[in-house]
Amino acid sequence: MSESSDAITGASILLDQVTKQYPGQAKPAVGGLTLEIPAGSIVMFVGPSGCGKTTTLKMINRLIEPSSGKIVINGEDVTKMDGDTLRRRIGYVIQAGGLFPHMTVAANIAIVPKMLGWNKEKISARVDELLELVSLDPAIYRDRYPKELSGGQQQRVGVARALAADPPVLLMDEPFGAVDPITRQRLQDELLNIQAEVQKTIVMVTHDFDEAVKLGNWIAVFDEGAQLVQYDSPERILANPANEFVENFIGSGAGLKQLTLTRVNEVDLVDAITALPGELASDVLSRLQGSGQQQAVVLDSRRRPVRRLSRRQLSRLQIIDDTVDDSMPLVSDQSTLNDALDTMLVSSSETAVVTGRRDVFRGLINVQTIMEAISQANSAATADSDAPVGLNSGAIPALAVENAIAADSSGEANGQAEPQSTGESR
């Protein structure tokens, strides 16, 4: 995860011997699960279908009532709280956002604030703030209906709605599973950018291990009955899977998955010649020729990239207009190097345009930079091949966890506490 100076607004979550036993079932869907989720972290639940991931997620906000055990959020046992009151304090996102089709975007986002008795002015300001946060222009989107949005836009609105009342916890049940790969990558990047600003506690269910590696501070690998096989950082799960089950779940190509651990914001970006709509094309061309670069990046009034112009294109123009090029190779600084390389290959381009928070232009990344980073990572991995990889969270006592934190800086780099668990459900 990227470094951020923003304060953590998420809440710690403790599942203490949580069990869900359905009538007539020989085995529990979730059997005595104990799991601690640190405040402000993203924890990914992965495992085969039917293993209890979604059941566990839904028990946190009591859409499914646990048969026994405690669920403690910021020190409060929420199993003793009114369920409706609890759910208004927890954001929940499902596939396609789960928007109400007969309500506008603004009305969808405003649902919980209205329930909490916020006044109209406060709700309107919050709707606009959240649409800005998820990179949707309020002037364009607040009065649209879900059917007028793309799948990716619907999902962004779903995230905005879940954040409407500023809840400390956000639960996400395979939120990006129904969109195409390119939109999925952009939504993942957007979530990381949002998390860098809001620092909530996010618990997400996914079937995609690559997604878990990309998004998670911590990954919980479940087997049948929500047996917790391994609960660890993505780096350590890839380097040291707990057993054959985890190895098989990761699948072949674990070495390639290491490429998803390095983000665009961790490498040096290339500066670019930029232009604004309304500028003389000849002025931009002069700057471009003096730089030795081949293309200029056109930015809008909020410094968001809208298109690239080559020297030949500039020579044919008089004034730079505000035309948007949807095919421009674009990645977030939260994207992985693997994402960036994919984007360049799909667009047949040697460079991609990089954006940061609120889609603001950051610079360019090129194939050479990625290849150098991969080479350095491979060299480092070879040099450290005999070094201990640290925590493998079987039944680990607290002291061992503290020692692992001291020995391994990955938890500090993420700005998150080390999670603890019993290592299995009983």
Image (spheres, rainbow, N blue to C red):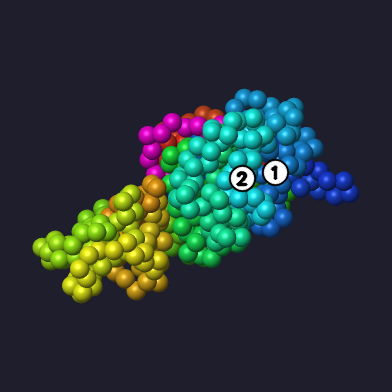
Residue 388: image x %, image y %? 42, 45
Q: Is residue 139 left or right of residue 384?
A: right
Would you say residue 137 is visible in this rendering? Answer: yes
Mark linked to residue 30: none
Q: Which residue is mark 1?
A: 58
Q: Is residue 234 left or right of residue 336?
A: right
Tell me which segment is drawn in magenta: 1-12
Q: Residue at x 51, y 65 (%)?
A: 181
- Quick one: label 2, few (<14), some, or many (20+) residues within 10 Å? many
Q: Which residue is mark 2?
A: 107
The C terminus: image quadrant:
top right
Q: Nearer the viewer, residue 138 or 253?
A: 138
Residue 252: image x %, image y %? 52, 65
Residue 79: image x %, image y %? 73, 30
Q: Is residue 18 above or below residue 25?
A: above
Tell me if residue 11 is in the magenta stretch. Answer: yes
The N terminus: image quadrant:
top left
Q: State the image quarter where residue 82 is shown.
A: top right
Q: Residue at x 62, y 25 (%)?
A: 75
Q: Is residue 318 left or right of residue 49?
A: left
Q: Is residue 346 above or below residue 28?
A: below
Q: Residue at x 47, y 49 (%)?
A: 139
SS of the residue at dot 2?
helix
Q: State the image quarter where residue 293 is shown.
A: bottom left
SS of the residue at dot 1?
helix
Between circles 1 and 2, the one closer to the viewer is 2
Would you say residue 43 is visible in this rendering? Answer: no
Q: CA distance from mark 1 to mark 2?
A: 25 Å
Q: Residue at x 46, y 44 (%)?
A: 133
* Of the image marks 1 and 2, the number of the one nearer the N terminus: 1
